[in-house]
Amino acid sequence: LVPVFVETVVLLVGFAVALAVGLISGRAQLGWSLLALPWFVVVFVMFASGIGILLANLDVIVSDVRHIYGIFTTVWFFLSPCFWWPNFIAEKASWAVTLMTMNPAYNLLIAERHVLGLAPPELGFTSTVVGDLMVASAWALGFLLVGYGSFMANKHKYADLV
């Protein structure tokens, strides 16, 4: 959990920088969606903690998890809307957007853009910060429950496996 809280501080600093640069350049707009920042941070911490606890449990049982996860996250990065907008994909293949929305990180990243005020209306972007955060909250709660459940189910084995 320590890396999750360290990365949360990094996220908040990055948020401040991105918001400042967005406001200076005229790309970002301050709005009511900025009030969703605390909700976003809580969902982010739950999401990352759930995945972290799950991976920590798996790493005790299967030592190659960290190597496989490194490959998986590279693929996951390119399938997540980190540097592309869903509308750009929809122009080429609308079926791909439906597939991309099933990505657990999709709604979290889109909600982050809404909170920062970086979801420009000219792209025809129709999602809302509340809707995206609700879906992201469900994913985060799911990951947290699975991670914590796997920890509680296997904690008696750790002394023998480590």
Image: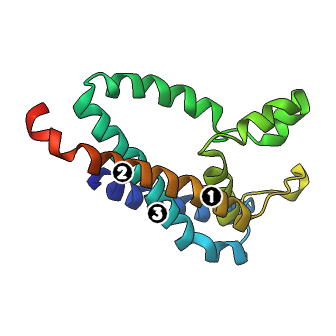
Q: Residue at x 52, y 62 (%)?
A: 43
Q: Say which quadrant the C terminus sits in.
A: top left
- On the image, numbered disc 3 is attached to which residue? 12
For the residues marked 1 and 3, what is the alpha-carbon distance in whole angstroms? 11 Å
Residue 16 in sight from this viewpoint:
no
| 82 left or right of 26 in image | left
> Where in the figure is residue 145, as x and y percent of width and height?
43, 54
- On the image, numbered disc 1 is attached to which residue? 112
Choose between 155 and 14: the one closer to the eye.
Answer: 155
Which quadrant of the view contains residue 33? bottom right
Q: Which mark is residue 8?
A: none
Q: Secondary structure at mark 2?
A: helix
For the residues marked 2 and 1, what is the alpha-carbon distance in whole angstroms? 28 Å
Q: Earlier in the sequence, mark 2 or mark 3?
A: 3
> Where in the figure is residue 46, as x and y percent of width and height?
45, 59
Q: Nearer the viewer, mark 2 or mark 3?
A: 2
Q: Secondary structure at mark 1?
A: helix
Work out whether 78 lies above or below 141.
above
Which quadrant of the view contains residue 27? bottom right
* Mark 3 surroundings within 10 Å by alpha-carbon count, few (fewer than 14), some (14 through 19), many (20 or more): few
Label 1 sits on what residue type? Answer: Glu
| 94 left or right of 160 in image | right
> Where in the figure is residue 123, as x and y percent of width and height?
87, 49
* Mark 2 surroundings within 10 Å by alpha-carbon count, few (fewer than 14), some (14 through 19), many (20 or more): some
Q: Residue at x 41, y 59 (%)?
A: 8
Q: Which mark is residue 149?
A: 2
Number of marks drawn = 3
| 11 left or right of 23 in image | left
Choose between 2 and 60: the one closer to the eye.
Answer: 60
